[in-house]
Amino acid sequence: MSSKNSSIADTNDVPVSQPDGKEDVPYHKGQIAERLLAEARNIMATELVEDVTARRLCRAVGVTSANFYNHYPNLEYLLLEIAAQEFDRQHKQNLRILRRGLSRDDAVLLVTQYCVDFSVRHHQLHRIMYGHVPDSSINPNYMSAADAGMRTLVHIIYGEDRYDPEDLVKSHESCAKAYAYVAFMSGLASGISRQIFANPSGTRAERRNFVETLTRIFLTGLGPEGGTSDRPH
């Protein structure tokens, strides 16, 4: 005979009533993690990343709040999982740019335009990719995706693969121009998407002209293409 407790469902796995007349969503453990991610994306599409909470995600998905921790150790880990997905997409896009055989300057300009366009359309995603979570090392998927993206940017900047995530001291010395570029690119994208830099006409064409002007000024500071030294003269 089964025990009394064995007939009682785990309350963590019980669907909760949905707000606004929505039907209860059946619980399928294999899908919950993906649905939590999708709901976080939905919120960030129209609201701030600060509006994403574990309780709100679970309510929207249709499970109890405690169930969140069956899938993610904390909310920051989930946000970094989304950021890792975006870094992976960005990495693949930049690989395509690298394989086109463009000059360094043209490739960097194209990468910058893509980054700014992405941040304007998806600023909250840009935020979680670039520093919103203080300790990104808690999510190995994020670290791996970010390192892959950095490796490609280094290759674009230097024309060779010299980035070593296992030896960051060496990489900081040998890839300084690439680090400077990431700081420039992410800062410019954030400034434009937050409207810190005005766009008087409000057109995409004017924004892209502005991005090109600033990027070419930055590239002038990098020195000649193919240079090997990162030390100031």
Image (cartoon, rainbow, N blue to C red):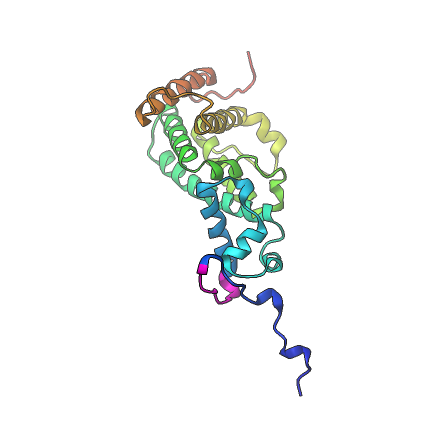
Instruction: Return the residue nearer the eye: 179 or 103.
Output: 179
Q: Which picture quadrant has residue 98? A: top left
- Determine whether 203 is above or below 75 in the image: above
- Determine whether 51 is above or below 224 in the image: below
In the rendered image, residue 231 lying in the magenta stretch gets the answer: no
Q: Residue furthest top?
A: 233
What residue is rendered at 45% in x and 16% in y?
223
Q: Which picture quadrant has residue 137? A: top right
Tell me: 80 left or right of 216. Answer: right
Rendered location of residue 209, percent (x, y)? 34, 21
Rendered location of residue 141, percent (x, y)? 54, 47
Q: Is residue 99 visible?
A: yes
Q: Quadrant of the C terminus?
A: top right
Instruction: Return the residue nearer the eye: 232 or 61.
Output: 61
- Determine whether 186 is above or below 34 in the image: above
Image: magenta residue range: 21-31
Tell me: 73 left or right of 141. Answer: right
What residue is rendered at 34% in x and 29% in y?
102
Q: Which picture quadrant has residue 232? A: top right
Q: Residue furthest front?
A: 20
Rendered location of residue 56, percent (x, y)? 55, 51
